[in-house]
């Protein structure tokens, strides 16, 4: 029987729980952001924005400046999260827990 491995469950929880809750402007809109998508409501309507749509917005020039940096940090964090998932699932034992912990801290 395998032992319950907490460090391998934490990255999976990061995919399920909301990471950011934000307000746009002076309450012109609000949203919740998960690892792979975000949901926002503005005076123009409700939107579900996937991570690939944000990348496309940057490439098309709709997003620029500080917002571009925040989206790039978000994408980098998602890449680290998937690396954590790969390391935690492929390595068993103390070395896997150690690498998973280091990547979570990053």
Image (cartoon, grey):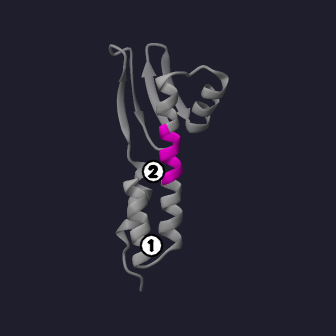
Closer to the camera in the image, 16 or 83: 83
Closer to the camera in the image, 47 or 80: 80
Instruction: Tell which tag, 2 or 1, sits nearer the viewer.
Output: 1
| Magenta residues (range) | 73-80
Secondary structure of the residue carrying numbered label 2: helix
Q: Quadrant of residue 94?
A: bottom left
- Report the residue at 57% width, 31% height from top: 54
Which image quadrant: the N terminus?
A: bottom left
User: What residue is pinned by disc 2?
Assistant: 15
Image location of residue 34, percent across then percent down: 44, 41
Is residue 41 within the magenta segment? no
User: Is residue 60 shown above or below 106?
Assistant: above
**Outermost residue to the left:** 26
| Residue 70: image tag | none
User: What residue is pinned by disc 1?
Assistant: 96
Majority SS type along the magenta span: helix
**Outermost residue to the bottom:** 1
Image location of residue 83, percent across then percent down: 52, 58
């Amino acid at each position: 029987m395998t032992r319950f491995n907490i460090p391998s469950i934490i990255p999976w929880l990061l995919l399920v729980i909301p990471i950011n809750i934000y307000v746009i402007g002076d309450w012109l809109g609000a949203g919740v952001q998960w690892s792979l998508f975000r949901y926002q409501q503005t005076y123009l309507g409700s939107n579900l924005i996937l991570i690939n749509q944000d990348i496309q917005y940057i490439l098309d020039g709709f997003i620029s400046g500080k917002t571009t940096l925040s989206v790039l940090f978000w994408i980098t964090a998602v890449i680290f999260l998937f690396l954590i998932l790969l390391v935690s699932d492929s390595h068993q034992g103390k070395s896997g827990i150690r690498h998973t912990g280091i990547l979570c801290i990053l």
